[in-house]
Amino acid sequence: MSQQEQLSDENWTLLFITWIIATAAALGSLFFSHVMEFAPCVLCWYQRVCLFPLVIILATGLFPFDKRVVTYALPLAIAGWLTAFYHNLLYSGIIPQELQPCSQGVSCTEKYIDLFGFLTIPMLSLLGFSTIITLLFLLKKRTSK
Amino acid sequence: MKYKIFAGTCLVLIGIFLASSFYFKDQQAKQYDFMAKHNLSTFVREHSKSLGNSDAKVLLVEFMDPACETCAAFSPLVKQMMADNPGKIKLVLRYAPFHDGADYFVKILEASKNQGKYWETLKVMFDSQSEWASHSSPQPQKIWQFLPEAGLDLERIKQDMNDPEIAKRIEQDIADAKTLNVRKTPGFFVNGKPLETFGSKQLYQLIRAEIKAKY
């Protein structure tokens, strides 16, 4: 295998891992809403709007491998990350809840799960988007060489 | 090769999802079963209104909301199931007023107990629901023009509905709904078993299974 091929294989694997993370996150969010029957709040929905297409877009970029996938996936991931970041600020009380619009219906600050004292659902979302963005940036750097 | 890895990963991820769903539901069923045996009061409180033979071996607990359309649609179905199996089903109503402002109607309903017109009032509420509980423009005050059909003394209802005891009952029901993971109405439990998927057929099946097991 030439060095070029090996590099491209590594890039493929990197994108593949990114896809696995996005898919696991999407399935996890479906688990919360359909199996555990937690109603997703408005902010959760905005994050899902960014997350679900990533599963398709990243998979499309795998066959055949297309480095431009980063261009299409990154904006979605960043939009999701920003929403998740805002959601975490609300959740932890840094921004008071009265200032945001989703007090009716499902509250965006109702705590459903809290693993190990810090892993809440919005935190999982933030971690997921952060990892996806990091990997996409890494891929961008490797492919633009 | 890459296609195979991709397809394999898809299968593994979906497999994990299905297995954990199954495991979660199984654990939840065990938990409900435990509560039905040891904490029956979570399902039935002293204030809870019931219908049917008090010695019936099938206990159907329904968490409902007078402003919920699906609850209204289920009401005749549940009555039909009870009529089809005379003496075997006892229905207990609990409140899960999830609609905005729904506790207002629950208060009226609770107050109707003092006049012995509970079931009549509930029927009038369900029949006239579309008039006052529309999602886009709810008009709670409109309910008063229908209430006389139940033979109620409206002045007395207005006095009784603000009894703090009623507010306490609603709070208790909401707390129990939360404990039992009721997040949508109507929420049914048949001898402590929840519906695995929602639907009138599923409810009918569960009730039939319990009747078969107990009689």
Image (cartoon, helix red, strand yellow):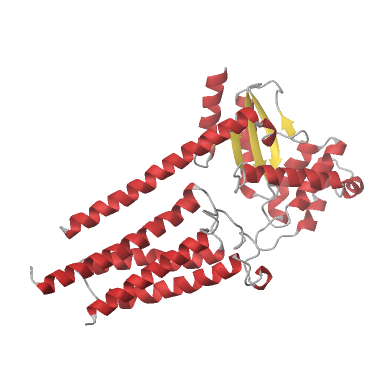
**Residue at x-position 61% and y-position 23%:** B85
**Residue at x-position 28% and y-position 64%:** A59
- Write down the quadrant of residue B55 in the picture: top right
Please state, as top left, top right, bottom left or bottom right, where the C terminus of chain A lies in the image: bottom left
**Residue at x-position 52% and y-position 41%:** B199
x, y percent for residue A132 = 37, 68
**Residue farthest toward the bottom in the current orientation of the protein:** A145
Question: In the visual, does B124 lie left or right of B179?
Answer: right
Question: In the visual, does B19 lie left or right of B143?
Answer: left
Q: Nearer the viewer, residue B144 or A108?
A: A108
Question: In the visual, does A2 lie left or right of B129?
Answer: left
**Residue B54 visible in the snapshot:** yes
x, y percent for residue B133 = 70, 55
x, y percent for residue B91 = 67, 31
Q: Nearer the viewer, residue B197 or A139?
A: A139
**Residue at x-position 54% and y-position 66%:** A43
In the image, is residue B107 above or below residue B213? below
**Residue B201 visible in the snapshot:** no
**Residue farthest toward the left in the current orientation of the protein:** A1
In the image, is residue B26 above or below residue B17? above
x, y percent for residue B1 = 15, 57
In the image, is residue A97 above or below residue B119? below
